[in-house]
Image: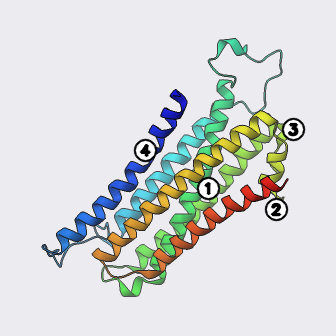
Amino acid sequence: MNQTANTSSKKRRMRLPLYAAGGAVVGFISSAAFTKLPSDLNWTLSVYYDYDLLFALIALVVLVMTIWNSISLARTPSARPEEEEADDISDHPSLMSPAERSLGSAMMLSTFSVITSFAWVALALSLYASSRDLPKSSNLFTLGNLVAACIAVIIVVVLQSVTIKRYNRYFPDRALDLNSRNMQKNHFEKLDEGEKWIVYRAAYRSFQMMNLLLGVGMAALVVYSILYSFAAFPIILLSVIWIINIGVYFRETYRAQKQ
């Protein structure tokens, strides 16, 4: 009974951001009918050049995660200690040793760094391609920003490769093969039943959060269209992603029922 109540409470808490976003959209639309926004209102997150503050924040995030990833790797020995040299499990509150927790943090941070750096490259390339239409755009800034983003990608990819090699040394029985097209599937097949159950649970939580974020993103794009101009493509793109996300879930559910 308590478990059912806790599950219902968690679902209500997860819906709160969506309700808040919907209320914000309705409130903004209502207020926009009576209040006119200033024509000189700046939404480009810029100080000297267009979007320079935005790219500075992205660069700072990549830098912090890269340093944090390096620190986590430094706390992890280059090779997993032997069983007789390993610390007693009873000395730790969890089944993972401190070195394994540091390695897990490094794996997570390396993934986040790669995603953020590739987003930086995509934004920098888009800015460079459309710099002619921006009044405060500088060719030197846009080109330097693009070069810095490419350098960041190289650094984080190399660091991720080092992190994965460290992981493979710790867990040779479930090593990640970067040259395999089905790397994630092959890695999943190497897990035991308990670890697979953890992956299933995490995947379902991720699925729930993705549905919530897609709804919030849809509301945010409506606000964006109100502030700037009508943008159909991002809304359609989110709708397609949402449909595919739900469709994959139902397909896998029906496939499991037939087995």
Q: Which of marks 2 and 1 is nearer the N terminus?
A: 1
Amino acid beneath label 2: Arg
Q: In this view, does 54 lie to the left or right of 185?
A: left
Amino acid beneath label 4: Arg
Of the pair 23 and 195, the residue shown nearer to us? 23
Q: Which of marks 4 and 3 is nearer the N terminus?
A: 4
Residue at x 60% of width, y 56% of height? 114
Q: What element carries label 3?
A: helix
What whole-number distance in Å separates the C-alpha atoms at marks 1 and 4?
41 Å
Residue at x 81% of width, y 47% of height? 187
Q: Mark 1 points at which residue?
A: 155
What whole-number distance in Å separates the C-alpha atoms at marks 3 and 1?
28 Å
Q: Quadrant of residue 38?
A: bottom left
Q: Position of residue 185 (x, y in %)?
A: 80, 53
Q: Quadrant of residue 88?
A: top right
Q: Mark 2 points at which residue?
A: 181
What whole-number distance in Å separates the C-alpha atoms at marks 2 and 4?
39 Å
Q: Name the residue under label 3.
A: 173
Task: Give the residue furthest to the front.
Answer: 1
Of the pair 177 and 76, the residue shown nearer to us? 177
Q: Where is residue 201 in the image (x, y as percent from the top left)?
A: 65, 42
Q: In this view, does 252 lie to the left or right of 28?
A: right
Task: Give the residue furthest to the bottom.
Answer: 132
Q: Mark 4 points at which residue?
A: 12
What whole-number distance in Å separates the C-alpha atoms at marks 3 and 2?
19 Å
Q: Position of residue 247 (x, y in %)?
A: 65, 65
